Image (cartoon, rainbow, N blue to C red):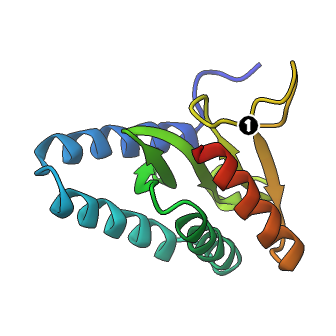
Amino acid sequence: MADGFSAEEKAAMKERAAELRAEAKREKGAAKAAAELQDVLDAIAKLGDDDRTLATRVHELVTAAAPQLAARTWYGMPAYALHGKVVCFFKAAGKFEGRYCELGFNDPAKLDDGSMWPTVFAITAIGPAEEKRIAELVQRAAG
């Protein structure tokens, strides 16, 4: 059993606290949206090469498939929100020393399918089939 939070988890919590402080200081409207988008682009730029390549492509796919989602960071990760609630996010493999990157969906995502459905998808590469699947999932999640 682990003794508390890992260093990576503590760092993510600190990132989230900083995001909340920055959010409280920002103006509303287009200036806020532009600043939050820049936060996402900066977060992607800080990633290692492989993670950055996947994060960039996921960002492009999400913003094209569901332009109504607002880009923002969430625990230091690129995320996409609707009405202030994070619908989906990208978690880099390097963030928590994972084996693969993930595309995750939170409760506001409209992916319900019976009594059991996936909410996180592992991503190791993005080709045409994955592009299509990501676009479909994001469109459905955003409603």
Q: Classify the position of the C terminus by image quarter.
A: top right
Reply above or below: 117 against 131.
Answer: above
As drawn, which residue projects farthest toward the front?
143
Q: Residue 119, can we see it?
A: yes
Reply above or below: 119 against 102.
Answer: above
Q: Classify the position of the N terminus by image quarter.
A: top right
Residue 25 placement, left or right of 137: left
Q: Amino acid at mark 1?
A: Leu
Task: Classify 10 Å Cα crowding around label 1: few (below 14), some (14-19), many (20 and above).
Answer: some
Q: Which residue is more in the foreground, 137 or 8? A: 137
Residue 82 placement, left or right of 62: left
Q: Residue at x 56, y 32 (%)?
A: 108
Residue 138 x, y percent position in the rendering: 66, 54
Q: Which residue is more in the foreground, 140 or 5? A: 140
Residue 119 x, y percent position in the rendering: 75, 37
- Residue tagged by mark 1? 111
Q: Residue 99, can we see it?
A: no
Q: Residue at x 61, y 35 (%)?
A: 106
Q: Which residue is more in the foreground, 27 or 54? A: 27
Q: Residue at x 80, y 69 (%)?
A: 132
Locate residue 47: give its quadrant: bottom right
Reply above or below: 27 against 117.
Answer: below
Residue 92 x, y percent position in the rendering: 65, 59
Residue 103 x, y percent position in the rendering: 70, 53
Locate residue 94: give its quadrant: bottom right
Q: Residue at x 48, y 63 (%)?
A: 67
* Secondary structure state at the residue bearing disc 1: loop
Numbered marks: total: 1
